[in-house]
């Protein structure tokens, strides 16, 4: 351990809270702490959370580990329900979406690589306060800024 790179301990319930619509996210480890190689966020998705529309990334990749509940995940043309202890890796250029179709809260630990994707959540929170109608043009600008493209986008 060096002073330039100290260990980071984040206890349960800790982390920067980010509210995006009806979901809560807790930023556990920001990318500057990892030399921008990855970030870690805990998602807390309420029952019936519709999730984002299907999308893909050219650069970012996700690793999701379900801590609690049942997360519905769409990968290309397949759908799976991930329950506690399930893990999924979503490489770049794979069309995906997720939702909480259950009657219980879902908690998911998410690793995004490379770092920087956590800024997407912060921009969404800053742009769309809770209960505010979504401006689709502004939403598209934010998505493109953070490497989030529609399913039919050709790289």
Image (tube, rainbow, N blue to C red):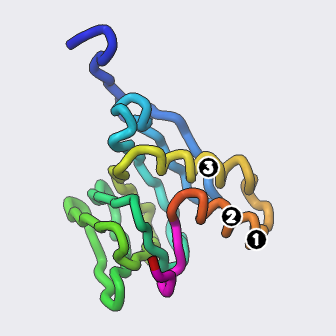
Determine the CA span between mark 1 and mark 3.
20 Å
Marks 1 and 2 in Cβ contact (< 8 Å): yes
Q: What element carries label 1?
A: helix
* Residue 78 location, quadrant: bottom left
Q: What element carries label 3?
A: strand
**Residue 129: percent from left, percent from top:** 75, 53
**Residue 93: percent from left, percent from top:** 36, 73
Determine the CA span between mark 3 and mark 2.
19 Å
- Disc 3: which residue: 19
Q: Relative to residue 57, is residue 13 depicted above or below?
A: above
- Foreground residue among 142 and 102: 142
Query: Mark 3 or 2 closer to N-term?
Result: 3
In the rendered image, the residue lying farthest to the top is 3
Residue 152 highlighted magenta (yes or no): yes
**Residue 99: percent from left, percent from top:** 46, 73
Compared across the picture, whether 105 is left or right of 73 comes to right
**Residue 38: percent from left, percent from top:** 35, 43
Residue drawn at 61 percent across, 49 percent down = 19
Compared across the picture, whether 15 is left or right of 143 comes to left
| The residue stretch that appears in magenta | 148-154
Q: Is mark 2 on a helix, strand or loop?
A: helix
In the rendered image, the residue lying farthest to the bottom is 77
On residue 13, the disc is none
Q: Magenta segment, principal secondary structure?
A: loop
- Disc 1: which residue: 137
Residue drawn at 71 percent across, 47 percent down = 126
Query: Mark 1 or 3 closer to N-term?
Result: 3
Mark 1 residue crowding within 10 angstroms, few (<14) / some (14–19) / many (20+): few
Q: Relative to residue 96, is residue 26 depicted above or below?
A: above
* Number of numbered labels in the structure image: 3
On residue 141, the disc is 2
């Amino acid at each position: 351990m060096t002073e330039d790179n100290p260990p980071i301990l984040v206890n349960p319930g800790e982390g920067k809270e980010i509210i995006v619509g009806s979901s809560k996210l807790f930023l556990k480890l920001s990318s500057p702490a990892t030399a921008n190689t990855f970030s870690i966020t805990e998602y807390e998705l309420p029952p019936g959370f519709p999730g984002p529309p299907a999308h893909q990334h050219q650069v970012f990749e996700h690793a999701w580990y379900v801590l609690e509940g049942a997360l519905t995940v769409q990968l290309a043309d397949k759908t799976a329900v991930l329950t506690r202890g399930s893990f999924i890796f979503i490489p770049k250029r794979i069309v995906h979406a997720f939702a909480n179709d259950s009657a219980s809260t879902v908690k998911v630990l998410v690793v995004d690589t490379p770092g920087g994707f956590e800024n997407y959540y912060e921009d969404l929170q800053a742009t769309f306060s809770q209960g505010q109608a979504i401006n689709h043009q502004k939403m598209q600008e934010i998505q493109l800024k953070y490497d989030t493209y529609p399913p039919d986008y050709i790289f």
